[in-house]
């Protein structure tokens, strides 16, 4: 039972995308002399999975501005990496406005990172607020996502141990690849210290996943997974559309727009809608249909600016 479960969980869409951007952001931070762990985005597994679902939706339909879609999809890996390096939310918004207003336009990779920042910021605000990836809320949502993906899921100690071993194996490879990045030449000792801190923090997070899988606190589970709204809902229309996009289906724009203009009955769906609406707003701004003031006002209404 343990091997099939481990394989099921580790092959789930969203899990490896959750780990890959962590590596990409660490590499980007090193290349730009930024801190190893950038503070601009702090999402856990659920937030990364939701961001990936948004990108799948962008790639699977014509419901978004063509320039937004093209830029996000062509520079997806770079965008994931650099989206987390901004510490001031005004910076990515300024990049989008610069691209919209003409003059000295940003490089496409930079615009892609700014658009991806909107995606991640939208889903994180919808799921975790300002809590961060190690908060009770984020950890319980991550485990809720694992259980949602895996059905009844890993709920015994043996199954949780198998899951942890699999995740630790991936983490070791991740750590080795990060360790090969050229250290900060101005402060090599500090760079290594931050690397160790990062590694220890990741190990503690994985251990918390195992603990919550096998012995969740009933009150926290009700609050963060089964609350109002619940994290997931079986017959949610938005989740149905996301599942089709995740599977690679080409969706009619009408279907996607109807979902985006409606309401989701679960927190995960609401987070995805928030990010999608932010991208729609950016598309109007980039397409000349909304001035900068309107763009920023729309983001304020989404609690993103």
Image: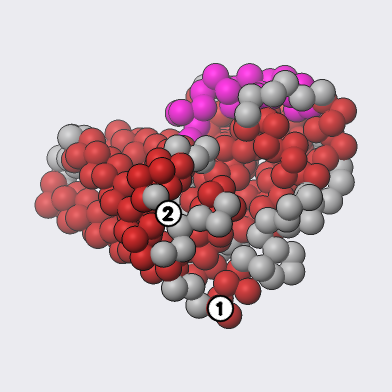
Quadrant of the rendered structure where residue 225 is? Answer: bottom right
In magenta, the rendered stretch is: 59-80
Q: Is residue 189 left or right of residue 31?
A: left
Quadrant of the rendered structure where residue 203 is? Answer: bottom left
Outermost residue on the left side: it is 189
SS at mark 1 in the image? helix
Vertical placement of residue 75 versus 178, above or below: above
Dot 1 or dot 2, earlier in sequence: 2
Residue 118 in view here: yes
Residue at image coords 51%, 23%:
75
Residue at image coords 68%, 46%:
272
Q: Are marks 1 and 2 in contact (CB under 8 Å)?
A: no
Q: How is the image coloured?
A: secondary structure
Disc number placed over residue 60 in the picture, else none: none
Tag nearer the camera, 1 or 2: 1
Outermost residue on the bottom side: it is 219
Residue 236 is situated, as x and y percent measured from the top left of the image, at 78, 49
Residue at image coords 44%, 73%:
215
SS at mark 2 in the image? loop
Residue 64 is situated, as x and y percent measured from the top left of the image, at 75, 27
Front residue (pair 119, 200):
200
Residue at image coords 74%, 69%:
228
Residue 219 is situated, as x and y percent measured from the top left of the image, at 58, 80
Q: Is residue 272 left or right of residue 146?
A: right
Residue 26 in view here: no
Q: Which residue is mark 2?
A: 39
Is residue 103 located in the magenta-colored stretch of the structure? no
Residue 151 is situated, as x and y percent measured from the top left of the image, at 57, 52
Q: Is residue 6 left or right of residue 101?
A: left
Q: Which residue is mark 1?
A: 218
Front residue (pair 127, 241):
241
């Amino acid at each position: 039972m343990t091997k099939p479960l481990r394989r099921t969980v580790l092959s789930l869409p969203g899990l490896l995308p959750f780990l890959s951007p962590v590596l990409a952001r660490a590499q980007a931070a090193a290349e730009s002399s930024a801190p190893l762990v950038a503070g601009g985005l702090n999402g856990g597994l659920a937030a990364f999975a939701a961001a990936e679902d948004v990108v799948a939706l962008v790639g699977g339909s014509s419901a978004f501005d063509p320039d937004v879609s093209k830029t996000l999809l062509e520079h997806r890996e770079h965008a994931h990496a650099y989206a987390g390096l901004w510490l001031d939310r005004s910076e990515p918004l300024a990049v989008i406005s610069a691209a919209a207003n003409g003059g000295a336009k940003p490089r496409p990779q930079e615009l892609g990172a700014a658009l991806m920042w909107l995606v991640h910021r939208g889903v994180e605000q919808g799921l975790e607020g300002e809590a961060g990836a190690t908060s009770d809320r984020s950890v319980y949502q991550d485990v809720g996502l694992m259980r949602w993906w895996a059905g009844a899921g890993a709920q015994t100690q043996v199954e949780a141990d198998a899951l942890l071993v699999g995740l630790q194996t991936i983490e070791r490879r991740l750590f080795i690849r990060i360790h090969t990045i050229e250290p900060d030449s101005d402060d090599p000792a500090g760079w290594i210290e931050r690397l160790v801190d990062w590694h220890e923090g990741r190990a503690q997070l994985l251990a918390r996943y195992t603990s919550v899988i096998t012995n969740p606190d009933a009150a926290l589970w009700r609050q963060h997974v089964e609350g109002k709204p619940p994290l997931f809902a079986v017959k949610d229309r938005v989740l149905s559309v996301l599942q089709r996009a995740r599977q690679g289906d080409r969706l009619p724009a009408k279907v996607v727009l109807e979902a985006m203009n409606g309401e989701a009955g679960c927190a995960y769906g609401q987070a995805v809608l928030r990010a999608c609406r932010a991208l729609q707003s950016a598309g109007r701004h980039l397409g000349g249909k909304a001035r900068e003031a309107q763009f920023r006002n729309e983001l304020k209404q989404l609690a993103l600016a």
